[in-house]
Image: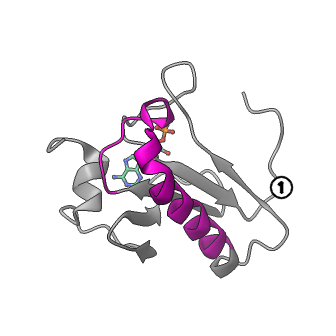
Amino acid sequence: MSDCLFCKIGRGELGTEFLLETDGIAAFRDIHPQAPTHILVIPKKHIQSLAQLEPEDQTLMGELLLAIRELAEKEGLQDGYRVVVNTGRDGGQSVDHLHFHLLGGRSLQWPPG
Ligand code: AMP
């Protein structure tokens, strides 16, 4: 998906600063942070959303979740954090490339709106 925003970010085409990068994933700060820590973690491979995940993505998703744990530790979120994956229109997904929000650094409310 050459015109996908997060594909471009993953390829380093927009000069985005990565907090963590491997061959498969990248993590960067959300441009409109909703909490003191608001990081997005993406697979570099174009996957539209959780709804398009395939069994072949299992290892990649494991890597991504472990990266989130590592990032949370680096950010000092020992009191807790939230991981959000908005999926599809009703889920509030606005960028059609799978991404995990890591939010923390303040007390988060529940339920979300
Ligand atoms: P969602 O609404 O779950 O699809 O989340 C998309 C997120 O991407 C939003 O929190 C946006 O603020 C964020 N975002 C959009 N463009 C950029 C960008 N260029 N760099 C970093 N974050 C972005």
Question: Would you call the spot at circle 1 few (<14 residues within 10 Å), some (14-19), or many (20 or more)?
Answer: few
Q: Main secondary structure of the magenta part?
A: helix
Q: Is residue 107 visible?
A: yes
Tell me the residue that label 1 is attached to: 107
Q: Say which of 42 and 19 sits in front.
A: 42
- The residue lying at 27 percent from left, 46 percent from top is 5
**Residue 47 lies in magenta, yes or no?**
yes
Query: Can the viewer see residue 30 in this picture?
Result: no
Location of residue 46 in the rendering, given as x and y in whole percent from the top left corner: 30, 45
Give the image location of residue 49, x and y in percent: 44, 35
Q: Is residue 74 above or below residue 31?
A: below
Is the shortest distance between ligand 1 and the CB of mark 1 under 8 Å? Answer: no
Furthest residue to the front?
A: 55
Q: Amino acid at mark 1?
A: Ser
Name the side, left or right, on which 71 lies relative to 2: right
Where is residue 6? Give x, y as percent: 31, 50
Name the residue at the top extreme. Answer: 90
Q: List x then y, in percent, for residue 68.
A: 60, 65
Horizontal side, residue 68 vs residue 7: left or right: right
Residue found 85% across the figure and 69% down from its top: 79
Where on the picture, by quarter, is residue 3?
Answer: top left
SS state under label 1:
loop
Q: Residue at x 49, y 20 (%)?
A: 89
Q: Is residue 107 left or right of residue 47?
A: right
Range of residues picked out in magenta: 44-72
